[in-house]
Amino acid sequence: MGEEVAGNAFGIDIRRFSVLVLAIIIILAFVASFANIKIPQNSSTIQIGTSTQTEQYTQPKLFSYVYNKTITLSPTLQDLQYVRASFANTKAPYYNISPEAYILFNFSQPDNNMLQLLLNALAWNASIVAPGPYGALLSIASAAYVQILNYTNTTLQPFPLNKNDTENYSKYAIIVNYAKDFETPESFQPSWSYPPSDNITVSPLSYNIIDTYTVKVTISVSYSTSTSLASSSTSQNGNQTIVTKYYKMSVSGTVYLLANGSSIASNNFQFSYTAVPPYKLNYQNTSIYQQSFTISGNVSVPPGVLRTVYLTYNVTAYQYKKEQTSGNTTYICYYPTNPSFNYKPDYFNWYEYNVTIPVTIKVLNGTAPITTINNENYMGRTINTYFWYTVWSSDPTSNTTSILTYDHIQVANYSIKRTWDAGSIEIIPQLNTQTSGNTINYYLTFNVKNNLVRPPPWINQQMTYNKYAAISWFYLEQNASLSHSLYEFIMNTINKTDYQFWKSEYFILASQFVMYTFNTTYSVFNNLLELESFYENWSLVDANILNLSAWPKQEYFTNLLIFFNISKIPQIYNDTIFFNITNNYEVYLVDVYNALEYHEFDKMPFGNMFYYSNPMINQTIYFYLNTSEQPIPYLHETLYFTSANYVPTIFYASFQYPQEIQTRITAIWNGTAWVT
């Protein structure tokens, strides 16, 4: 027959409660079927208007309780973990819908627990939240400092879960101690403040050279030569024979690059050159070979980095003539000279700089803030310091100095850290290489990149304490504490076989508490719905409700019914007759208004019966009708259940009815069962 769902219905007009004459709770259990089990019957005579009727009804027998369970409600912020909400979609930094109407949280979207949301919001920095809404957050947190001066109490009565009352669950009498008189702080806690921020002034940068490192670069050459005849020619000059010879020189070896006298690189070489006829020379003593070479290598320089140095050298060779006559033959020989390696030492200079930027930091707001500059902590409101670092031109790395200010405030047992990230100042060196003769100087120039964050313009606005916000959130904490305590009691005492009824029992205990402790229909409605919504889905339905105060005149007024999804109720309550509508036991009835106003009623959530049918004319009068004059709920009606916590009127939070889950009634059973 589909999923089994259960519901309780509560009728009240939260929109027009001032004109409400009578409000009624009915409990409709959405279950498949129950056995017809009777429990002891009682008789009662009740006066309604001008008519007196005697009606048989069933009321759970009050047993002698074996155990006492005392629940003392001492609300704390920790109780907000049982409340579900989300952040509101209002815009930072004011989160308002009018100048001082701040909406920070939304109970319509149960995405997170309220405690974590509040702690996260209290940790917001000054760029996210202005003083006005932050004062609202601290006013909420002030609920933790409401002091209970005196307690009062009420006793809740768990109902048996089976006919013979064989389980221990119903043997308890639950004594709930709750605040009767309390004292609310008149101001924020002395150590509380608006989150800190920094106003930073940066002075011009200065720098100077504090050290120099020089590398002298030279070479050392090792080579060997060999000479061979390149060409020969013969000519006659009279009787004299002239033999001319040209020789070739081959050279091979290694050149070593020396940095400050130590070899750091080497190159092997091999070349040759040949003597030529003198007429091919441009002028006398012109070289027959000239070539430039460059050798480079890496040398370690401060601060321990490798940098490339180099040297250019020239290789030059000439030729010379040797002439010898032997008889009628003259020998003219041209020989190359050995090569010469010519260079001038090169000098490479790197410089170490000290760079300084004076800075003044004004720390605004906060509680004993600490400013951290490159892992060094500073206290105080005015910090005069300077950022500095040393850098070699051989390793021109930039330097970034970050500024962070934070503080802590203590809220109850929670330490809240608020952090202002002021940004950073970056010093960026730029290499400036200058050459003078054989000296290469590596200088630096510097630029400053300011990445600092300015404090927002609203930080000097005032925070306002709201005492009434602290009180309203104190009551929410108390309800959250009660709901969790009742849940824990049920889970720790109920038999596993009765676990399916835990929501029904929770509804009973929560209903008792609100009817025993609140003295207005409006308070009963809001606190019951809030307590129930912590653990149960609920649905609001427009209905026409019978006006009991006008009886016997049949008169209806427009109002709301509330259904709670409690899954199942114990079978022993299936045949409990609270009001006979159509000769079937279809409705559990609790008359909230009369239960509060008339001493004849015992304020039990299952009790107080009425007989409205007129047996003389066989007329049936329904408590609740929809706009089409059908009883509510009726076959094929669709209900819309909400899972959000109902917190409609509380400071700095909103509640709109969220998207609901449809539940369609597909069958009605003769009794209290509604099957979907």
Image (spheres, rainbow, N blue to C red):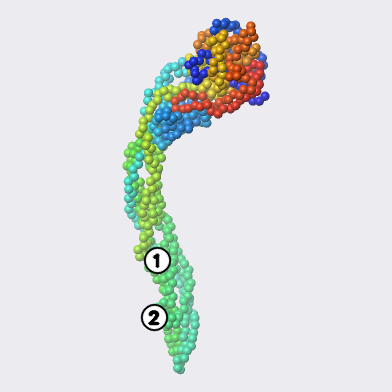
Mark 2 residue type? Gln
Q: Nearer the viewer, residue 301 or 72?
A: 72
The residue sitting at 56% across, 9% down in the picture is: 553
Judged from the image, the secondary structure of the residue bearing numbered disc 1 is strand
The residue sitting at 32% across, 39% down in the picture is: 382
The x, y position of residue 451, in whole percent, is 39, 45
The x, y position of residue 485, in whole percent, is 52, 22
| Marking on residue 218 | 1
Judged from the image, the secondary structure of the residue bearing numbered disc 2 is loop
Residue 505 appears in the rendering? no
The residue sitting at 34% across, 47% down in the picture is: 357
The x, y position of residue 35, in whole percent, is 67, 16
Q: Nearer the viewer, residue 323 or 161?
A: 161
Residue 87 appears in the rendering? yes
Residue, disc 2: 284
Mark 1 residue type? Thr
From the viewer's perspective, tell me whether residue 464 is left or right of residue 673. left
Count of all numbered marks drawn on residues in the image: 2
